[in-house]
Image (spheres, rainbow, N blue to C red):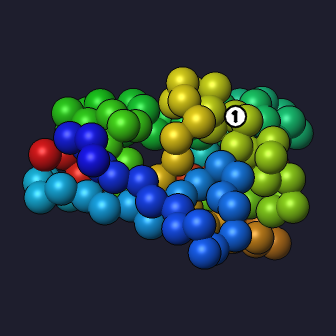
Amino acid sequence: MSEQRELVSPTELHPTPGFSHVTVAPPGRTIYVAGQAALAPDFSIIGGDDLREQTVAAMRNLEIALASVGAGLEHVVRRTVFTTRPTEHAVITDGIEEVQGSSEHPAQSIVGVTGLAVPGMLVEIEVTAVVP
């Protein structure tokens, strides 16, 4: 187990492309980050109609939110992805991995939705992190 978290995917369960079945977090300070999307400070959408680019922008916004409280993506123990395109999970995973710089993923759910808060948003990502 790393100092930050332990990622577990039992071999008895299906393979986990882009997530882990279980994350074990060490004791520490728990941080809950509200859903972040590909929104600039003026509420314009970053990435247009490109799901990958919107995912990258949402992840960069998550980095900013986490950094504001002394945490980073390596502290994330749970991730929920809300998207209007749930079957394009490989595209979402690719965008996430670009920003986090690794293919290690915490426990995750992808939830298909009919729409998000701002017209044109394709993805919103919320996380829970634990800082030892």
Q: Amino acid at mark 1?
A: Gly
Q: Is residue 70 visible?
A: yes
Q: Which of the 4 quarters of the picture holds residue 34?
A: bottom left
Looking at this view, is 68 or 7 the one in front? Answer: 7
Looking at this view, is 1 or 32 the one in front? Answer: 1
Name the residue rendered at 66%, 58% in the picture.
16
- Residue 9: x and y in percent read 52, 62
- Residue 113: x and y in percent read 76, 71
In the image, residue 62 above or below residue 12: above
Name the residue rendered at 59%, 36% in the picture.
103
Label 1 neighbour load within 10 Å: few <14, some 14-19, many 20+? many
- Which residue lies most toward the front here? 11
Name the residue rendered at 11%, 54% in the picture.
28
Q: From the viewer's perspective, is 100 left or right of 39?
A: left
In the picture of the structure, the residue carrying the numbered disc 1 is 95
Q: Is residue 121 visible?
A: no
Name the residue rendered at 45%, 60% in the picture.
8
- Residue 88: x and y in percent read 86, 53
